[in-house]
C-alpha cells in the first residue's frame, strides 16, 4: 500500500536549555498553539517573540463605548488584539475596518482574526497607511468609533530582520513597510551630519546628538558602513566613550533607544502621517463618534493633545480628556512595554 503521508520534519535544535535567537523561539512565534507556555512568559513580565500584548484594552473599551450595529475603524491593526476586543463588543452586528501598512504582519493578523470567527462579514482589512483615512471613509462611509495605537508592535521589534531594536543584530531597516521607501541605513547615507543632529533632537530629544552624529559620519567618511543595528549601536557607544564609566553603560542604552526611535520616526514619516491623520479625522466621524489614541512618546502625544484641544475650541469636538489616562501599575508589571503609553480621547460634536 502506497504511503502518501508527508514525512514528519523535526524542529531545528538549539544549543543549551533555552532558545536564544528569534527563530528558535518556535512556541512563542505561534502563541495560539502554545497557550500555557505563552502565559508563563507573559507572567514573568516579558513579551513572547512573534507576539504583541495589546495595551490598555479595558480603558479603550470604556472610552469607545461600542454598541452592536455600529461601524468602527482600527487605524493601526498590528497584532489584532484591540481589533478582536472591539469586534467582540459588536456582538456580530455592525462592521469593523482595520488598516495597516506592514505586508508581513497584515496577512498573519487577518488569518488570526478569521480563526477567531471574525471573517469578511464583520471585518474588512485594508493595506494602507492610516494617513489615508479620508479615502477609506470615502469608500466605506463614516465611523462611530475610531482607535489609533501609534506604537510599533512587539513582533516587529523582536524580529531582527526588521532592524527595529539595537538589542539584536540585523539590517538597519526600521521601515514599517519594508517594500517601500528608504531603509534607515540608506537614509544615513543620504543626509548631512547636521540633518542627523536635527533629526535626533526633533524626534527624540537626544542630549548627545552632536557627539553621536560626529562619530557616525566620521566612520562613514573613513569608509566604514553603518548598515546593521550593531554597527549603529557600536558607533553610539564609541561616541559616548568619554563619559564616566559609572554612568556610561546606562547612557549608551538610553541613547541607543532614542537614536533608533529618531530614525524610525524619520524613515516612516511618522509625524507627517500623524498630522495628516489628525487633520482628516473629524471628517470621517459620525456625530457623537468616539475616538481613542494611544501615544508612546512626547512628540506624538503633543501633536494629539494640541489637535484635540484646538478642535474642541472650534466646536468640532464636544469633549476631550483634560488629564491623560495611563496604564495601571498592574498592567505595567505584566507588560513593561506599556509604561510609556498615554491614552487620549475625543467625542465628535452632534450636528
Image (spheres, rainbow, N blue to C red):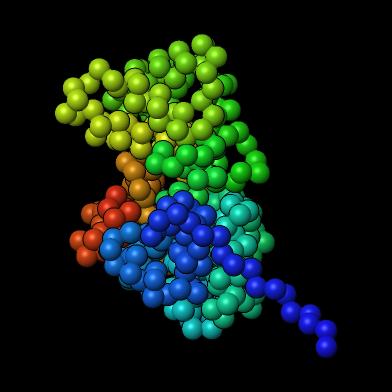
User: In the picture, residue 189 is in which quadrant?
Assistant: top right
**Direction left: furthest residue:** 246
- Residue 199 or residue 277, whichever sits in front: 199
Number of marks drawn = 0
* Whole-percent x, y for residue 190 in the image: 57, 21
Q: Is residue 179 left or right of residue 118?
A: right
**Direction bottom: furthest residue:** 1
Q: Residue, x 64% and y 68% (percent of image)?
A: 9
- Residue 299 or residue 315, whichever sits in front: 299
Question: Would you place residue 105 above or below residue 92 in this image?
Answer: above
- Residue 164 or residue 242, whichever sits in front: 242
Q: Residue, x 46% and y 79% (percent of image)?
A: 88
* Whole-percent x, y for residue 261 in the image: 41, 37
- Residue 336 or residue 296, whichever sits in front: 336
Q: Is residue 252 left or right of residue 220?
A: left
Q: Residue, x 51% and y 39% (percent of image)?
A: 170
Q: Residue, x 39% and y 41% (percent of image)?
A: 167
* Whole-percent x, y for residue 41 in the image: 34, 65
Residue 130 in view in this figure: yes
Residue 148 in view in this figure: no
Task: Give the quadrant of the N terminus.
Answer: bottom right
Question: Would you place residue 328 above or below residue 276 in this image?
Answer: below
* Whole-percent x, y for residue 316 in the image: 42, 54
Q: Is residue 51 left or right of residue 298?
A: right
Amino acid at each position: 500500500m502506497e504511503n502518501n503521508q508527508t514525512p514528519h520534519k523535526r524542529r531545528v535544535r538549539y544549543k543549551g536549555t533555552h532558545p536564544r535567537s528569534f527563530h528558535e523561539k518556535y512556541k512563542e512565534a505561534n502563541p495560539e498553539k502554545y497557550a500555557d507556555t505563552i502565559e508563563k512568559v507573559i507572567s514573568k513580565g516579558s513579551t513572547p517573540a512573534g507576539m504583541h500584548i495589546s495595551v490598555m484594552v479595558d480603558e479603550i473599551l470604556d472610552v469607545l463605548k461600542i454598541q452592536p450595529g455600529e461601524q468602527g475603524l482600527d487605524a493601526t491593526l498590528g497584532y489584532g488584539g484591540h481589533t478582536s476586543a472591539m469586534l467582540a463588543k459588536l456582538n456580530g452586528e455592525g462592521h469593523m475596518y482595520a488598516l495597516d501598512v506592514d505586508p508581513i504582519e497584515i496577512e498573519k493578523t487577518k488569518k488570526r482574526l478569521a480563526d477567531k470567527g471574525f471573517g469578511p462579514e464583520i471585518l474588512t482589512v485594508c493595506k494602507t497607511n492610516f494617513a489615508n483615512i479620508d479615502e477609506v471613509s470615502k469608500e466605506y462611509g463614516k465611523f462611530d468609533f475610531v482607535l489609533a495605537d501609534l506604537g510599533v508592535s512587539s513582533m516587529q521589534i523582536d524580529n531582527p530582520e526588521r532592524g527595529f531594536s539595537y538589542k539584536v543584530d540585523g539590517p538597519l531597516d526600521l521601515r514599517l513597510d519594508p517594500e517601500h521607501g528608504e531603509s534607515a541605513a540608506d537614509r544615513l547615507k543620504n543626509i548631512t551630519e547636521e540633518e542627523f543632529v536635527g533629526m535626533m533632537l526633533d524626534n527624540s530629544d537626544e542630549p548627545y546628538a552632536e557627539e553621536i552624529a560626529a562619530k557616525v559620519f566620521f566612520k562613514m567618511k573613513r569608509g566604514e558602513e553603518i548598515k546593521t543595528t550593531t554597527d549603529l549601536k557600536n558607533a553610539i557607544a564609541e561616541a559616548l566613550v568619554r563619559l564616566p564609566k559609572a554612568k556610561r553603560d546606562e547612557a549608551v542604552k538610553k541613547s541607543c533607544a532614542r537614536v533608533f526611535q529618531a530614525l524610525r520616526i524619520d524613515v516612516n514619516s511618522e509625524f507627517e502621517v500623524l498630522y495628516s491623520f489628525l487633520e482628516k479625522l473629524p471628517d470621517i466621524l459620525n456625530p457623537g463618534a468616539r475616538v481613542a489614541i494611544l501615544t508612546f512618546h512626547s512628540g506624538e502625544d503633543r501633536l494629539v493633545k494640541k489637535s484635540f484641544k484646538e478642535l474642541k475650541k472650534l466646536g468640532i469636538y464636544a469633549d476631550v480628556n483634560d488629564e491623560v489616562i495611563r496604564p495601571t501599575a498592574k498592567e505595567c508589571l505584566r507588560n513593561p512595554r506599556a509604561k510609556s503609553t498615554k491614552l487620549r480621547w475625543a467625542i465628535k460634536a452632534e450636528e
